[in-house]
Image (tube, rainbow, N blue to C red):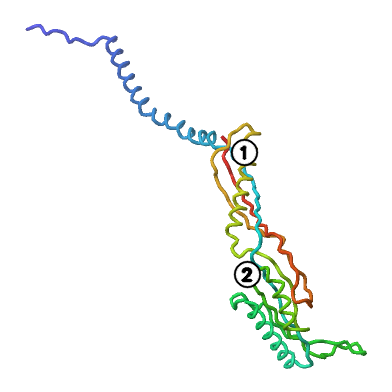
Amino acid sequence: MPHRPAPVLPNRGARAARLLAATAVLGGILLATAAPASAVAPERSVPRAAARAEAPATVTVTGSGSATAAPDLAILSVGVEVTKPTAKEAMAAQNTAAEALLAVLRKEGVEDRDIRTDSLSLNPVYTQTTGGESKVTGYQASQTFSVKVRDIDRAGQVIGAVNGATGDAGRVNGVVFDVADPKELRAKAREAAYKDAYDKASQHARLSGHRLGRLVSLSEGDSLRPGHGALPSMPADEPSVPLAPGEIEEQVTVSAVFELI
């Protein structure tokens, strides 16, 4: 009977080596799979921290500026007022006085576009009786007008002419001086306000050890024109009333935010 060679069995050392190799391969696969997850986590927090670190400091300031100019417009408040026993008579007398007022304004060169009725009223007049009761004894009718005089040197003359034409019914309630076109005056005041804000921001930057950066935002408040030279209500018996126009002042405020670098 022929002799069969005995099977060759792998030794224990070879099996152990193959097992170690397989374990190493499996470990590498697991590490490769888990690596992206562990690498992504830090990246999510980096932009937030960087954004907080890169946010620039800012300074907010308010600037104010003004500009003055000689007025070129006078706005008169004039009117008529009469008292009569009946409402019908009061309105009729008021109409006559108002027509005389309008006629003299046109005679003085005031255009219709510069004359506007501000108010018209008719009210009863009460008198206290000896018994303590109030009794209607008449009616008072009045009308006021706003009148623009574009040649301010003639404003006093217009006031005198109004009173001369309306007699005891005439009323002068006031006068203000202004500029017909305030755009240029307001632009100068705005420029001064911005310069004031910029100078303040520059000083804050220097005091805090920074340099002034770009302008972040800018807003403008309401402009103001104080001191209009009002003339109180007064009678005018002279043909011309002396007036002092003075100067018109425009005030502007701005609020600005600058970066500090």
User: On the rendered structure, is 45 left or right of 175?
Assistant: left
- Where does residue 204 sit, x and y in percent of width and height? 64, 38
Q: Whole-percent x and y of residue 75?
A: 67, 70
Residue 70, picture quadrant = bottom right
> Is 109 drawn above or below residue 185 in the view shown?
below
Q: Amino acid at mark 2?
A: Arg
Label 2 sits on a secondary structure element that is: loop
Indicate whether 252 appears above or below 45.
Answer: below
Q: Is 133 displayed left or right of 58 in the figure?
A: right
* Residue at point 76%, 84% (across, down): 167
Q: Residue at x 74, y 90 (%)?
A: 90
Given residues 101 and 160, the one toward you in this image is: 160
- Identity of the residue furthest to the left in this view: 1
**Nearer to the camera, 119 or 107:** 107
Describe residue 44's horizontal placement relative to residue 110 as left or right.
Answer: left
Query: Is 123 or 194 nearer to us in this picture?
Result: 194
- Mark 1 or mark 2, earlier in chain: 2
Residue in the picture at 16% in, 8% down: 6
Which label belongs to residue 169? none
Crowd tier of the residue under label 1, counting other residues whose Cα lies within 10 Å: few below 14, some 14–19, many 20 or above: some
Q: CA distance from mark 1 to mark 2?
A: 44 Å
Residue under label 1 = 202
Query: Which element type, helix, strand or loop, lies under badge 1?
Result: helix
Up-down relation of residue 157 to residue 89 (above or below): above
On residue 150, the disc is 2
- Provide residue 9's location: percent of width, then percent of height: 22, 11
Percent x, y of residue 146? 66, 75
Tell me the mark number nearer the camera, choosing from 1 and 2. Answer: 2
Which of the 4 quarters of the picture holds residue 97? bottom right
